[in-house]
Image (spheres, helix red, strand yellow):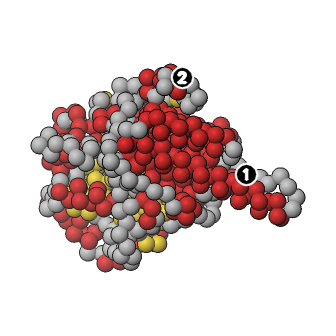
Amino acid sequence: MDPAAAAAPLTGNLPPQFPAAAANGVVYCLDPALFASIMRLGRQPGAPTAAEVARQRQEEEDAGIRLVHLLVTCTGAIQAGDYSAAHTNLTEARAALAAITTSTGIGRVAKHFVDALAQRLFPAYLQAAPSPAAPTEVHNHFNDAGPYLRFAHSTANQAILDAFEGCDCVHIVDLAIMQGLQWPALIHALSSRGGGPPHLRITGIGGAGDELGEVGFRLEEFTRSQGVPFTFREVRVDQLDGLREWMLGIVPGEALAFNSILQLHRLLVDPDADPAVPAPIDTLLHLVTSLQPRVFTVVEQEADHNRPTLVERFTNAIFHYGSMFDSMEAMSRRSGGGSTTSAVAEAYLRAEILDIISGEGSARAERHEPMGRWHERLARAGLTQVPFGLDEVRLAKAHLTRATFSGSGFGILECAGSLALAWHDRPLYAATAWRVTGGNAAGAVAVADTEGRDNRRRRCRNSRYGGGESSGRGNWAAA
């Protein structure tokens, strides 16, 4: 088969290419009932009778199940190196996708996985599609599309405020400051602190193209209006493992916090990588622990997309992003959000899907892992968890209700002192706070005070193993 001819019906305006890769010996299967959790059907029935409505819904559900089956089969063929069979499966998946709506439900999710598989099969013949907006605009639209980033920001801020209690000079190192959307709420809280606000320093980390100077200017304007003494420092690095202590301008005696929102997974490597070669994540964690911050706040996707086999990644990803798109669609309906906001926010998730499915090796950055593995990794690095307690749970639930108007469908789950934002009990993002094991004297006092408050220590009440995507809630329990 001529590759160019084969690629023609499958490829369209897709994002930049990734190299194709495959492995042999895959075994896979599809139970239609397994995918019930992602079948959110949204097509409006056209017939006036109940029987016709039921028939159309059943037809679309059957088409959706068949589509997912074709995509899993195509993924297995790619993994086994049978590209001819994969091409046939993908052609049939395109036809199945054309039979259902792609503006809502499973069609809205599946179209991105179809494109990701096409990009993996035919990387040499793809033309990059222009992004619907600049990266900063995409990030801002995703922030507005649901409570995802607001949950991350509010839980991290509360842990930082607790760690900074009683301190006169505080310093936050934000490992990816983006537009600085996290910090106005914290600045406002510091401005009303009893005894007056501390002197606040924020070091914002970004890349070469980030508008760090503009972000710093806006934060300076806001802190001035709030009466908070403020200093901003910008640091540009290509990757976080390139950070060095001298870049951060650490001042002796200041209370230090590190903040990471959806960044650490980008420093992971393949699970079967050579252990003799230090991973980028280990380099960064060594820097963090050496500086002994009072708190290290970490928020990550509660997902399992760093598996070595493509079929595992695909299956886990379609569950996770099925919940993400379903929740985003529900938020759009409640808020009356426009189609432009929804489309731009959708591009944020699409980029993650394309990376997870199309990329291999160093080309893959979205290496999401579940909370359990992060606990093990951070503990090995010399960090001890600072558990969220009842106060943080109440605040997280209050923030969630405000962000979603009613909170219906969304919830806060808790396990072993960690908090997660969930959609219908399926955890999407997990928040944790950490300190250096042992720590310095001031940090140890603050942690001892935190751990001494029994009403702020919680344990999960569900003993089911939560390592797989299809298990839903897993160890997480309703807070």
Residue 441 horizontal side relative to residue 108, left or right:
left
Percent x, y of residue 98:
67, 40
Q: Are marks 1 and 2 in contact (CB under 8 Å)?
A: no
Closest to the observer, 326 or 403? 326
Q: Quadrant of the C terminus?
A: bottom left
Q: Earlier in the sequence, mark 1 or mark 2?
A: 2
Which circle marks residue 43 in the picture?
Answer: 1
Q: Residues within 10 Å of mark 2 (few under 14, many from 20)?
A: few
Q: Residues within 10 Å of mark 1 (few under 14, many from 20)?
A: some
Q: Amino acid at mark 2?
A: Ala
Q: Is residue 366 above or below residue 402?
A: above
Seen at 39% across and 76% down, the residue is 462
Seen at 22% across and 52% down, the residue is 293
Percent x, y of residue 403:
57, 56
Which circle marks residue 5 in the picture?
Answer: 2
Mark 2 residue element: helix
Which circle marks residue 425 in the picture?
Answer: none
Percent x, y of residue 455:
35, 77
Q: Is residue 193 visible?
A: no
Residue 129 horizontal side relative to residue 122, left or right:
right
Seen at 38% across and 32% down, the residue is 20
Farthest-out residue, front:
1
Q: Is residue 451 visible?
A: yes
Q: CA distance from mark 1 to mark 2?
A: 33 Å
In the image, which is nearer the foreground, mark 1 or mark 2? 2
Q: Amino acid at mark 1?
A: Arg
Seen at 85% across and 55% down, the residue is 47
Mark 1 residue element: loop
